[in-house]
Image (cartoon, rainbow, N blue to C red):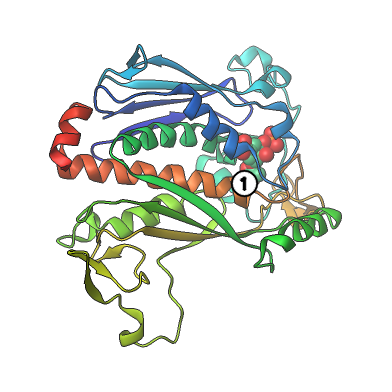
Amino acid sequence: MEKFRFLTSGESHGKSLTAIIEGVPAGVGIDIDFINSELHRRQQGYGRGDRMKIESDTVEITSGVRFGKALGSPITLVVKNRDFENWQKIMSVSPNDRTDDKAFSVYRPGHADYAGAVKYNQEDLRNILERSSARKTAIEVAVGAVAKLILKEIGISGSSEVTQIGSACCPDKFHKEIDLAKENGDSVGGKFVVVYKNIPVGLGSHVHWDRGIDGRLAQVVMSIPAIKAVEIGDNPLGLCGSEYHDEFEIKDGEICRTSNHAGGVEGGMTNGQDLVVSAVMKPIPTMMKPLESIDSKTNEKAKAHYERSDVCAVESCAVVAEARIAWVLVNEILLKYGSDSIDELKSRMI
Ligand code: EPS
């Protein structure tokens, strides 16, 4: 991302998760309570594991904000891992603390263990698990909350909803699906939709493949751990062109549409309609009833590694997707309208 840039760091059971964000216009109100409420939302959801009982994620801001407003300088966010207290020796940075406690060598099918260990030449698969864990999405949601605060200043807001858990498509049956998976030592995935409203026309571009906002949205949602499919708009198969495309009309002197199958994106650009992005999350690969696998030390058959995990995290994943979509929207808005301060941005967007 060119205008709203950041890096994150941190291991799942390390001391903390950190982000340094650059590009937040000066004068944006940085409401810590809002960031913490987003972190809280990410921790919720039926089916989360016991880690969420240990953590109570809150953010510390160590730069870039003064008296509640962004300075325009890099903003540093820190979310501490409470569980680090129990992992100090295991996650120590000192070579003197080296231990095999919590080391593991049997790949979990579906997780990053195998490809990560081959790629980074690691024997202890914990060295891959620690960063591939979805724990890192906590700091991503904090960055997304800052992006949402920018969007709020210009009247843009987003929300999400779980639309499917396992084979159940109505909310009354979601808990039952999760309970059943838990009873069976299994896990379950699902589907969710994110909607952002009041989006200006013309974010993204049709002129080059890498500037299409659809591609950028797909990338940030697809790379959330466990996401396997991303969709923009609703795409009922079998509709012909005359049924699918969203016809124009004039209502109260404004150009509008009779439907929104395109999900607010045409030709790689936002078209002023609601932005609608949905995604499919596979079942979490760490399971009480482990799958068949291989021990990387012996190359012999073994049951996959198990440790504390979630049975279902689709609700949390939807919150992560909201956050990541906020990054893209802010980046595109800053690309289109520029702006060093929030007042300048507002005046350019009229
Ligand atoms: C997560 C924290 C992790 C997992 C989960 C996401 O905590 P722990 O590993 O200590 O139990 O609960 O990560 C995964 C399911 C995964 O496959 O990586 C969190 O904060 O969201």
Residue 186 percent location from the top left of the image? 78, 56
Question: Residue 69 vs residue 267: left or right?
Answer: right
Whether residue 187 is situated above or below residue 323 in the rendered picture: below
Residue 3 in which image quadrant: top left
Location of the C terminus by quadrant is top left
Please tell me which residue lies in front, 123 or 311: 311
- The residue that mark 1 highlights is 113
Q: Residue at x 46, y 46 (%)?
A: 322
Where is residue 309, by image quadrant? top right
At 22% from the left and 29% from the top, the residue drawn is 342
Quarter of the image for residue 246 reads bottom left
- Seen in the image, is 58 located left or right of residue 186? left
Report the residue at 69% width, 69% height from top.
167
Residue 161 in the image: x percent, y percent?
A: 55, 55
Q: Nearer the viewer, residue 289 or 157?
A: 157
In the rendered image, the residue lying farthest to the front is 252
Q: Residue at x 74, y 63 (%)?
A: 173
Count of numbered labels shown in the rendering: 1
Height in image: 175 above or below 127? below
* Vertical side of 101 occupied by 211: above or below: below
Is residue 215 in sight in this rendering?
yes
Q: Amino acid at mark 1?
A: Asp
Classed neighbour count for the residue bearing mark 1: other residues with Cα under 10 Å, few (<14), some (14–19), many (≥20) = many
Residue 218: x %, y % from top left: 39, 57
Up-down relation of residue 122 to residue 248 (above or below): above
Indicate the quadrant containing the N terminus: top left, top right, bottom left or bottom right. Answer: top left
